[in-house]
Image: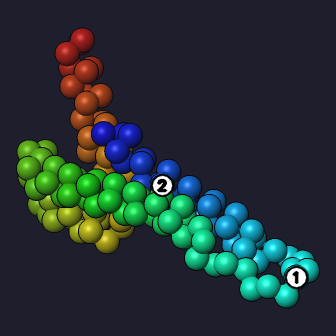
Amino acid sequence: MLVLTVLPFVFFGLYFFQFYTTFFKVFPPQLTSNEVPELFKDMGRLMLPFFLGFISQMAVYILYLLHAIKNPRLTEGNDRLVWILVLIFAGPIGSFIYWRLQVWLEKEKRFQEEYD
């Protein structure tokens, strides 16, 4: 689940890197010719990581919302509601926080109980 949680960060980082390199390739600092650079030539290569990041974030979003709804540890007070709101409004960062505090620590506790 960690790989799926971190995947949107990787794709959006790749998108911003490609956007930066494409921008300076299309609009070089010193444009010497009178030609208008082709802006849309590299749009497919530029948009692929964006769409992959969007799709992976939606998968993480749905996965963790379902996990929060079915999580038996979230029964005290408004824990379930708070985590659902964190997942909805905090986006990828909220997904990472939820993974760290609810999924990973739960596995670590089960591992310790098993070997104690």
Q: Amino acid at mark 2?
A: Phe
Q: Position of residue 55 (x, y in %)?
A: 32, 59
Q: Secondary structure at mark 2?
A: helix
Q: Could you tell me which residue is drawn at 30 percent across and 39 percent down?
A: 1
Q: Within the image, what quadrant is residue 65 found in? A: bottom left
Q: Position of residue 15 (x, y in %)?
A: 54, 61
Q: Is residue 64 left or right of residue 56?
A: left
Q: Position of residue 76 (x, y in %)?
A: 11, 54
Q: Residues within 10 Å of mark 2 (few under 14, many from 20)?
A: many
Q: Could you tell me which residue is drawn at 12 percent across and 47 percent down?
A: 71
Q: Nearer the viewer, residue 62 or 42?
A: 42
> Could you give the CA–CA distance between mark 1 and mark 2, rounded to whole angstroms?
34 Å
Q: Is residue 48 left or right of residue 84?
A: right
The residue labelled by disc 2 is 11
Q: Nearer the viewer, residue 63 or 67?
A: 63
The residue labelled by disc 1 is 33
- Count of all numbered marks drawn on residues in the image: 2
Q: Could you tell me which residue is drawn at 50 percent across and 51 percent down?
A: 10
Q: Is residue 38 visible?
A: yes
Q: Nearer the viewer, residue 113 or 65?
A: 65
Q: Within the image, what quadrant is residue 39 found in? A: bottom right
Q: Secondary structure at mark 1?
A: loop
Q: Could you tell me which residue is drawn at 24 percent across and 11 percent down?
A: 115
Q: Amino acid at mark 1?
A: Ser
In this view, the mark in front (1 or 2)? 1
Q: Residues within 10 Å of mark 1 (few under 14, many from 20)?
A: few
Going from N to C along the chain, the mark reached first, 1 or 2, is: 2
